Each structure stands twice: as C-alpha cells, then as structure tokens.
C-alpha cells in the first residue's frame, strides 16, 4: 500500500462514508464530512500539484481560510450552501479520494 497519502486517504474515506451513510440533507452530510476533511493539510500533497490544487479548491468551496476556528467557519458555510453547491463539494471529495487511490 502506498503510504504517501495515507492520512489523506483515511480522512477522505471517512468523509465519503459519512456522505453516503447519513440520512440528513446534503448540507448536513457535507458538514459532517468536513470534520474528516479538516484533518488533512495541504502539505500532505506536496509534490503532487494536481491533488494540491483540488484540495485547495475544496477548502475554497468550504471557505476555509486563516481563521482560528476552521471547523466552525467550514460548518457555518456548509450550512448556507445551496443543494447544488453542497453536491459540488461532495463530488470534489469523491474525486480527490479516487485520485488518492
């Protein structure tokens, strides 16, 4: 098994499992998945520019920036997403996990 992105793979798998297993709205599922996503840092994708860009895009969609409480900011923004925006985030989470495979 490739250990290069082991933490990211584990966290994205947990996020996808959360997206798939929840019975809540898509926004609720994205909020729940965000907890796993925020366990990953952009530094984990050093040397893989495509994954780094996709991960940065995901963080941008969650509107995560340099604030002290990243989880609170991401959760608040996910709660305000339209269904379309939340589905885009969920699709990107799945795309990144597939690329990590």
Image (spheres, rainbow, N blue to C red):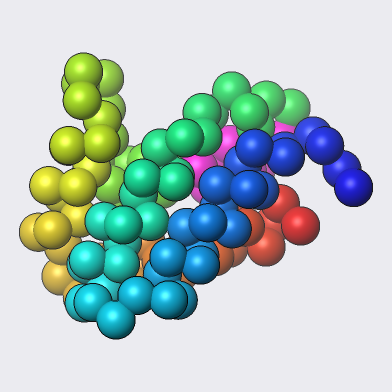
Q: Which residue is drawn at 53% across and 56% down?
A: 14
Q: Residue at x 28, y 47 (%)?
A: 62
Residue nearest the observer in this picture, 77 or 38: 38
Residue 49 in the magenta stretch? The answer is yes
> Is residue 4 found left or right of 7 in the rendered image?
right
Is residue 93 visible in the rendered image? The answer is no
Q: Is the magenta stretch mostly helix, strand or loop?
A: helix
Q: Is residue 38 above or below residue 47?
A: below
Give percent across and percent down for residue 63. 24, 41
Give percent across and percent down for residue 10. 63, 48
Give percent across and percent down for residue 12. 55, 53
Give percent across and percent down for residue 67. 20, 21
> Is residue 2 found left or right of 73 in the rendered image?
right
Q: Which residue is drawn at 32% across and 42% down?
A: 60
Q: In this view, does 31 lie above or below 88?
A: above
Residue bounds of the magenta highlight = 48-55
Q: Based on the displayed image, in which of its 4 quarters is residue 24 positioned?
A: bottom left
Q: Which residue is drawn at 67% across and 63% down?
A: 98
Q: How many labels does the image show?
A: 0
Q: Is residue 99 above or below residue 75?
A: below
User: Looking at the rendering, in which quadrant would you find the C terminus?
Assistant: bottom right
Residue 54 in the magenta stretch? The answer is yes
Q: Based on the displayed image, in which of its 4 quarters is residue 4 positioned?
A: top right
């Amino acid at each position: 098994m490739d250990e290069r992105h082991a933490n990211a793979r584990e966290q994205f798998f947990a996020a996808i499992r959360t997206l798939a297993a929840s019975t809540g709205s898509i926004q609720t599922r994205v909020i729940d998945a965000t907890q796993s996503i925020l366990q990953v840092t952009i530094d984990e994708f050093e040397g893989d520019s495509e994954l780094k860009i996709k991960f940065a895009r995901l963080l941008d969609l969650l509107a995560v920036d340099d604030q002290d409480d990243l989880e609170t900011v991401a959760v608040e923004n996910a709660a305000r997403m339209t269904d379309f925006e939340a589905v885009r985030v969920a699709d990107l989470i799945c795309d990144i996990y597939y690329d990590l495979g």
